[in-house]
Amino acid sequence: MIDLVIYGKPIGKARPRFGRNKHTGKVVTFTPQQTKNYEQEISTTAQCAMFGKELMEGPLKVEIKAFFLHKTKTGFHVSRPDLDNIIKAILDGLNGVVFKDDASVAVLSASKQYVNSEDEERVEVVVDHV
């Protein structure tokens, strides 16, 4: 089992952006820098948790809890970023570090919740065998 915490405000994976190569004029696709940075932070945190351990093989279950500042009557965060984009950023950051590919994830549980202070914003991730 791997249990890790990514501190700071949870960030969803942004859509790819398009531009033109100024030398060739060809259309290119690129990942926004904020997404790259967040996935690298996830990967680095996972590398510390995986120190001395082998890549996990499927089937795997992943539990993701994203905690945001603000509070509503429901206790759940119902605004952006979308939960599916948070999941994608987390799984992409874990690829090649915790497991070979996120295709080995067979069971997934995820939620967005509120905390009372900015210092408590984070994402908690647990990866285990089914």
Image: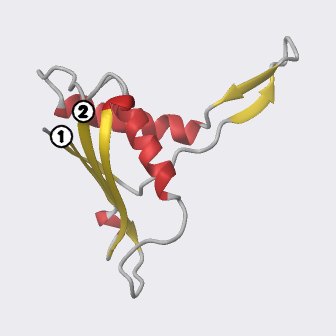
Amino acid on which the number 2 mark rests in the picture: Pro
Name which residue lies at 24% across and 36% down: 60
Dot 2 or dot 1: first in sequence order is: 2
Name which residue lies at 40% across and 81% down: 71
Q: Which residue is mark 2?
A: 59
Where residue 110 appears, as percent x and y from the top left, is 34, 56
Q: Quadrant of the N terminus?
A: top left
Name which residue lies at 84% across and 18% down: 22
Asked whether disc 2 touches disc 1, contact meaning CB atoms under 8 Å apart, the reply is yes
Looking at the image, which residue sits at the far right? Answer: 25
Crowd tier of the residue under label 2, counting other residues whose Cα lies within 10 Å: few below 14, some 14–19, many 20 or above:
few
Q: Which residue is mark 1?
A: 130
Q: Secondary structure at mark 2?
A: loop
Name which residue lies at 45% across and 42% down: 89
Specify the quadrant of the image occupied by residue 8.
bottom left
Q: Nearer the viewer, residue 40 or 109?
A: 109
Seen in the picture, residue 120 relative to 33 is either above or below; the reply is below
Where residue 107 appears, as percent x and y from the top left, is 29, 45
Where residue 62 appears, as percent x and y from the top left, is 27, 45
Seen in the picture, residue 10 relative to 98 is either above or below; the reply is below
Seen in the picture, residue 72 relative to 113 is either above or below; the reply is below
Looking at the image, which residue sits at the far bottom? Answer: 73
How far apart marks 2 and 1 lie (CA) works out to 6 Å
Q: Is residue 17 left or right of 128 when viewed as pictured?
A: right
Seen in the picture, residue 104 relative to 120 is either above or below; the reply is above
